[in-house]
Amino acid sequence: MREDHAEIETTTMFNLLVAPPVPVEVELGYSTSDPYAVRAVFNPGGSASVEWILARDLLADGLISDSGEGDVRMWPILDQVDQVVIEFTTPAGHARFTADAEELADFLNRSYELVAPGSEHEWFDFEHELTHLGNVN
């Protein structure tokens, strides 16, 4: 496991698909200490922030085809190649956003500069995670 951790962040806008669409600021973060995940913090104006942890592979795959199962799904908009849809589903509700595909691709490319695809295991501390799981009440 590698010890020289680094992080990247960017802020972008997603559009909540309601009539009319509502822009929502989203902070994306990636850390080599959790190399499989991307953190997305949604900051709707005047409301509490909401954080989702997304698989980095789901974001990459969703730029080119239907991706994800369950709570998070993503796919490109066929007639708008610069846009993707990201859909979140929970027992409490459902939200669908559009996002700029190029901004997501740029963020993913920056994450690949930190951890190349397929080398995530070099950064992941399985022993630490197993110990952490054993301490969860």
Image: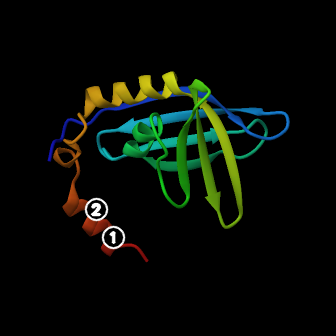
- The residue lying at 35 percent from left, 25 percent from top is 110
- The residue lying at 30 percent from left, 44 percent from top is 35
Q: Amino acid at mark 1?
A: Leu
Q: Which mark is residue 133?
A: 1
Quadrant of residue 97 in the image? top right
Position of residue 106 measured from the top left corner of the image (x, y, whole percent)? 43, 22
Q: Amino acid at mark 2?
A: Glu
Quadrant containing the C terminus in the rendered view: bottom left
Position of residue 124 measured from the top left corner of the image (x, y, whole percent)? 23, 50
Distance (Cα) linking label 2 and label 1: 6 Å
Q: What secondary structure is marked by label 2?
A: helix
Position of residue 71 measured from the top left corner of the image (x, y, whole percent)? 55, 58
Total marks drawn? Answer: 2
**Mark 1 Cα within 10 Å, few/some/many (few <14, many 20+)?**
few
Of 57 and 12, which appears nearest the observer? 57
Left or right placement of residue 123 versus residue 60 in this view: left
Position of residue 66 measured from the top left corner of the image (x, y, whole percent)? 49, 45
Q: Which mark is residue 129?
A: 2
- Are the residues tagged 2 and 1 within 8 Å (C-beta)? yes
